[in-house]
Amino acid sequence: MTTEDEQAQAGTVEGQGPVEIDEEMARHLANKREELFEKFEIRDEFPAEVMQEAEERTEDVQQEIQDEVDERRDLRDMTTWTTDPIDAQDFDDAISVEKRDDEYVLWVHIADVTHYVTPGTAMWEEAVERANTVYLPAYTVHMLPPILAETVCSLVPNEDRLAHTVEMHLDPETLSYEEIDIYKSVIESDARLTYSECEEILDDPDSADDLLEDTDVDLAEKTELVWELADRMHEQRKEDGSLVLNPARDRAHTIIEECMLKANKAVTHELMWDRGVEAMYRVHPQPSPDEWDEALREIQDLGGVSIPGDSWDDPRKAVNATLEQAPGRQLSKIQRAVMFVMPRAKYMSDPFGGHHALNFEIYGHFTSPIRRLSDLINHWIVATNDVPEDLAALCKHASDKQKDGEQCEREYKQFIQEVGLDPHAVNNRGLEVVDDED
């Protein structure tokens, strides 16, 4: 490795390595977590019954998948891959894409968690109680036993997996849905890309061959195609008035974000307009006109910042346009001004009101059933058309638990800072306990 390469590597998360702490600091952090978990009623350890059930459901994996093949669509010959951060714990979504003469076809495959976790089971009841996974710096409280995400619900390369697939046929000009099909499938991922590997393939298509066992897989071509599609979907969303608070997001993030948004929107489109059923919709109220005016005035007063005159009529477009032109040093202040006036999004059994930030008439979650109760329940509703009787109460519970989890995260990060650690570094690099004598 050259000196230049070494310097570049030293600046990466991998190159820096975990943040080192001693045993006394580790005890302080553990005590603080325990205090916060009690305060916010967050369950850390799983009951023995739940763990036993999870272990039993992850035995004889391949045989169970083979038994399911005839009942599902077999998509194992389709080029399919996952793209996640290098430290991702859940590989529960994968994508496939084609461009035809008169359409794009986008497949989003989500691990079929509800094949393993069903109403009436101990795992389901525990997931309902927890409602979501809580991510603290270097510590995760899972909604479901991690063994699921590590085995049957992990869409790892070169292994058959059960999935719930959202197949979207998109108009090549407008990218609107021409057809939506949601079904149970069997897939086999060809590659697990990190975000940096995805970027590398887009820069150098030949690098894809180093990541594959099967050199016949057209991963570079597909990655380029899905980037072309995602970039167009992203620009269209902004043009339609969707708020984009992070204008500098890289291509890999954009691909995954846009594909997941498109799939979530497709599922809730199907649930609301084609079936007319209740589900766990994601509703985001809008700020009042006075609140938006307050935010825009605060942004306009920042040094070096000017809101384009033709965008004032739609505050979301005004913020988008301003973020793209503002000096880098002001981006976080603009984001804070917007977030300060934004009401909290919440789960509701009726989508009335829509999602203001995204500017979607209806919206809900489907793409992360391993870590969000809303997605788990929506998977069940899509597959069975069976809506839980207490859905409104479940929506309120999930909203409350999400709020508690976020507040727990904020207070834990504040404590980390108070004891002299960098929360950002801990979050990105993890922790390692070292002997005091080292």
Image: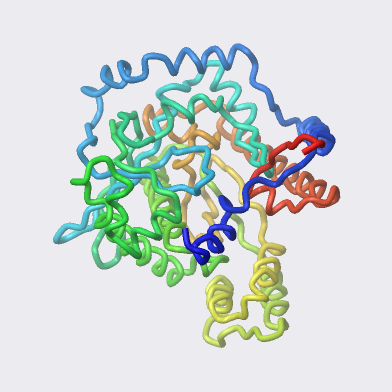
Q: Nearer the viewer, residue 355 or 138?
A: 138
Q: How has the structure been colored for display?
A: rainbow
Q: Compared to 274, does 334 lie above or below?
A: below
Q: Compared to 190, does 160 lie above or below?
A: above
Q: Compared to 263, does 358 lie above or below?
A: below
- Counting labels gives 0
Q: Nearer the viewer, residue 375 or 255?
A: 255
Q: Nearer the viewer, residue 188 or 321?
A: 188
Where does the image place residue 2, in percent across and percent down from the top left?
48, 62
Where does the image place residue 257, in percent across and percent down from the top left?
45, 55
Asked whether, in this view, residue 402 is left or right of residue 417, the answer is left
Where does the image place residue 277, in percent across and percent down from the top left?
43, 37
Instruction: Give the residue drawn at x 74%, y 45%.
Output: 407
Query: Which quarter of the figure is the C terminus placed in?
Result: top right
Asked whether, in this view, residue 214 is left or right of residue 256, the answer is left
Instruction: Give the residue drawn at x 50%, y 49%.
Output: 85
Q: Quadrant of residue 191?
A: top left
Instruction: Give the residue drawn at x 48%, y 46%.
Output: 364
Where does the image place residue 39, in percent across and percent down from the top left?
81, 34
Q: Nearer the viewer, residue 58 or 364?
A: 58
Q: Is residue 126 visible?
A: yes
Q: Is residue 178 visible?
A: no
Q: Quadrant of residue 78?
A: top left
Residue lying at the far front of the rendered structure: 2
Q: Quadrant of residue 11?
A: bottom right
